[in-house]
Image: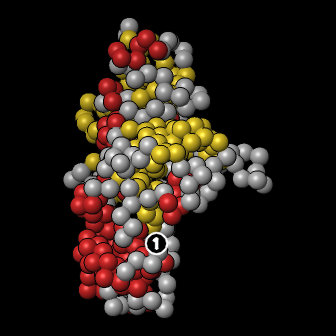
Amino acid sequence: MGTLVLKNVFKRYDNSSVYAVQDYSLECFEREFVGILGPSGCGKTTTLRMVAGLEEITKGDIYIGGRRVNDVHPKDRHIGLAFEDYALYPPLTVYDNIAFNLRAKKTAENVIKKEIMRVAPLLKIEDLLDTMPSALSGGQKQRVNIARALIRKPEILLLDEPMSHLDGKMRQILRTEIKRLHKEINCTTVLVTHDQLEAMSLADRIAIMKDGELQQFDTPIEVYNNPVNEFVAGFIGEPPMNIINVKIIQHNGQLKFLFPESDIKISVPKKHYQFLDEGMEVKLGIRPNDIKIKEEGSNVQIDIFENLGDEQRISIHVGEDQYLTLITENRKDLAAGQDINIVFNAERTHIFDGTGKKISK
C-alpha cells in the first residue's frame, strides 16, 4: 500500500538551535498526489529527504505502507526519488542511466530491458535511450531522472522541485506530462515545490509550510477559498490576495470596513458580525478578481496599469503604504492616473487579526 504518514516529526541540525521542521504531521492516501508548498527555506525539501531516509529524524515517526521506516535504509523504503538536479551520469547513455540502480542490485539484463521498455514510453523517452545526457534538453533530462525513479516500482514517488531549472514553456509541458504520468502509474506521489501554480494544478491536496511548520493541508480549491491564516491567503493566488489594514466603523446603522486615509467603505457581511465590534482594527483580505469596476462604486485613481493581453491588472494606492490590486478584462482604454469606480464582493472577504490568524470562517 502506497500510504505515507508523518506523525509529529521534528528535524534539528546539530549546529542549529532551531528546528528546520517542527511537529509536522501529514497523511497521504494511496495513489494520492500531494504537493508540499512553501517559500525557500521553509523545510519542505528537508521533509522530503526525511521521508526518503536521506536525513535523520530528530523526533517523531514516518510510516510508508503502514510500516515504520525511521530506521529503514533508503533503498528498502520502496520509494523513488527524482532530485531537483538531474544528477545523470555523463559517460552513460540514457538507457544505462535508467538501468544503473537495477544493475547495482544484480538484476538480470533481460529483466532490466523489460522494465526500461515499460517505463520509457510513460516518459516519452523511448527514442532517446541511446543518447548521451549532454545531447538532451533540460526537459528530457528531467524525464530521464523521473524514469530512473520509476524503474524501482516505488510505493511512493518523491519529486523534489523537478521543474525548477526549466523555462516557462517547458515547465508547462512537463507539468502536463507529470499529471498524465501520475494517472497512468497509480503511484502515491509527493511533489515539493515553491511554485503555487505547480501545486494547484497537479496536487489533490496541498500542504503549505512556513518556517518548518505545516500551515494548512487541504484541496487546492479549499486552500484558495478558505485560507486558515494571512500567510496562506497571501501565498496562494496570482496575483496574491490583497491584505489591507482597516478599521471597523458604524455607518447608517451598519458595520463597515473603513480603509485608511480613504473614503472607501465596505459593508461587513453578516457572517463576520459576531467577531467584530466598532473601533476594532483588523486586516481585510480580498482577492483581486473580487474587486470590479462599476459606475456606482467608490472613486479611486489608478496608480499602475499593466496590460497583459488577456487580462489587465490595476494597482490602487490606499493609505500611506498599502495597495489594492484588481484584475479586469477588455479594458485597454484605461491608464495610470485615470479615475475609476470600484465595488467589492463583501461576501468574499476574509478577516485576520494582528498576528495573521483568521478571525472568522
Q: Is residue 294 above or below residue 154?
A: above
Q: In the displayed structure, does residue 15 sit left or right of residue 330? A: right
Q: Which residue: 49% across, 68% down?
A: 84
Residue type of the residue flagged with mark 1: His
Q: Nearer the viewer, residue 77 or 174?
A: 77
Residue, far top: 253
Disc 1 target residue: 165
Q: Secondary structure at mark 1?
A: loop
Task: Indicate the position of residue 112 as horizontal and vertical percent values.
Answer: 34, 79
Q: Which residue: 31% across, 63% down?
A: 178
Q: Is residue 43 above or below residue 97?
A: above
Task: Indicate the position of residue 345 as horizontal and vertical percent values.
Answer: 30, 30
Q: Is residue 212 above or below residue 110?
A: above
Task: Indicate the position of residue 218 as horizontal and vertical percent values.
Answer: 38, 38
Q: Nearer the viewer, residue 151 or 236?
A: 151
How does the figure colour the protein chain or chains?
A: secondary structure
Q: Nearer the viewer, residue 104 or 207?
A: 104
Q: Which residue: 40% across, 55% down?
A: 156
Is residue 260 visible in the rendered image? The answer is no
Q: Nearer the viewer, residue 267 or 104?
A: 104
